[in-house]
Image (tube, helix red, strand yellow):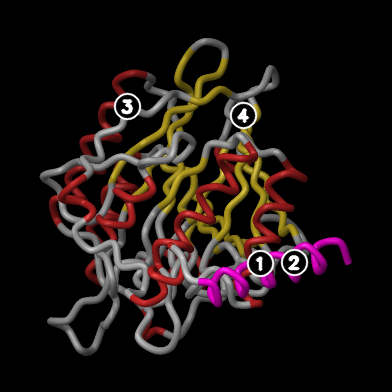
Amino acid sequence: MTNFLATLMAFITIAVSLISGGEFADEMKNKGDISGFAQTVTVQKELPDLCADDNGDFTVIQFSDTHMTTGVTFSDMQILSKIETLTKKYNPDLVVVSGDMIDDGNDGDFNKAYVLRTVAEIFEEADRYWAFVPGNNDGINYGTSADVVAYLSQYEHCLVADEPEISGGCQYSIDIISDGEMTHSMLFVDTMDYDNDDPDHIYGYVYEDQVNWCKEEINEKQQENKDVTISVFLHENTPDFFRAARKGKAYKFGYPTLMIRPEKYNIPKNQPLDDVFNESGCVGLLSMGHNHPLYDQCSFYNNTYYHVTPQAKLASALMTIHTQADNIKDMYDFKSVYC
């Protein structure tokens, strides 16, 4: 009831703002267009290392596929309220927003800038670090994925970075320190928008230069710590998600295994990414959004967890990484969380 009243009051406040004009009304007229923002802001943050607790545990809450349009529709405001409430309730070490924060904006009212600003301010107020990886919808209209990343990078608690010579809006890693050394690392990879050259496989894919970056980044982590484990966050699936759905085992008894969309949603051009991860022998988790399940799903396959986080308006995923675990199977705990 408290969340409903807070959402209603915020809705009324925005409605008054719209009627009276001002910055928000101006943004609504131009759809919150942030096109070209990446040309004015250079995304080259020096990202901090994050620390596990005394037991070597590190918690992540993952939100995905909010598909907001203005930030002030009743649906948008309910989602924003859920994000704020769950972040404060679980107080994670890191929040991950794994793509499609924004809908494509083709029809109706739209305010891209306000959605981005409102989400960022939730985490600023909560004093929580958060990471973002683009989805296939975030960069479609009124600003590319690179523009979105540049816009978000202005916020102190938003941990995003980009290799300027590499395809996509962002590629970066965040290390986790336990007992004074880097024991775990998280890679964030842009799976791109759409593949306009291939009508049979409409979704984008990770380009060769991005795959090479992943390989080099993993090699560097392994040189620093030969026992390192890597968790990868992206928006869309690789072919191994389909293999994990068919051949993998549930994360634990009674837990749902992967239920990936039909085979036409497979992205065979992402096979080189799977090859790099498999050859490394140290990737313990691939976690994606995109599929919109009611609850998080997870299969263990080829010594790796393949995880799909729910659509945020329904649920979100809470995971604990036990960085000191002796093996990958015991390294992760997953839980769907609701509000």
Q: Position of residue 195 (x, y in %)?
A: 20, 77
Question: Which residue type carries mark 4?
Answer: Ala
Q: Amino acid at mark 1?
A: Thr
Tell me the CA gap for discs 3 and 2: 38 Å
What kind of element bears circle 3? Answer: loop
Relative to 15, does residue 179 appear above or below in the rendering? Answer: above
Q: What residue range appears in magenta?
A: 1-20
The numbered mark, 3 or 2, whose residue comes first in the sequence reads 2
Q: Quadrant of residue 11?
A: bottom right
Q: Secondary structure at mark 1?
A: helix
For mark 2, what is the residue? Answer: 9
> What secondary structure characterizes most of the magenta part?
helix
State yes or no: residue 14 in magenta.
yes
Q: Are marks 2 and 1 in contact (CB under 8 Å)?
A: yes
Image location of residue 249, percent across then percent down: 61, 61
Residue 241 is one of the magenta-drawn residues = no
Mark 4, residues whose alpha carbon is within 10 Å: few (<14), some, or many (≥20)? few
Distance Cα–Cα, label 1 vs label 3: 37 Å
- What residue is pinned by disc 4? 325
**Which residue lies at the image location 68% right of the left edge and 45% below the top edge?**
333
Q: Sequence-wise, which precedes: disc 1 or disc 3?
A: 1
Which numbered dot is residue 219?
A: none
Kindly identify the residue that appears in the image at 25 percent across and 64 percent down.
144
- The dot on residue 46 is 3
Q: Secondary structure at mark 2?
A: helix
- Neighbor class of circle 1 (other Cα within 10 Å; few <14, some 14-19, many 20+) is few
Marks 1 and 4 in Cβ contact (< 8 Å): no
213 or 192: nearer the viewer = 192
Which dot marks residue 13? 1
Separation (CA) of disc 4 from disc 3: 28 Å
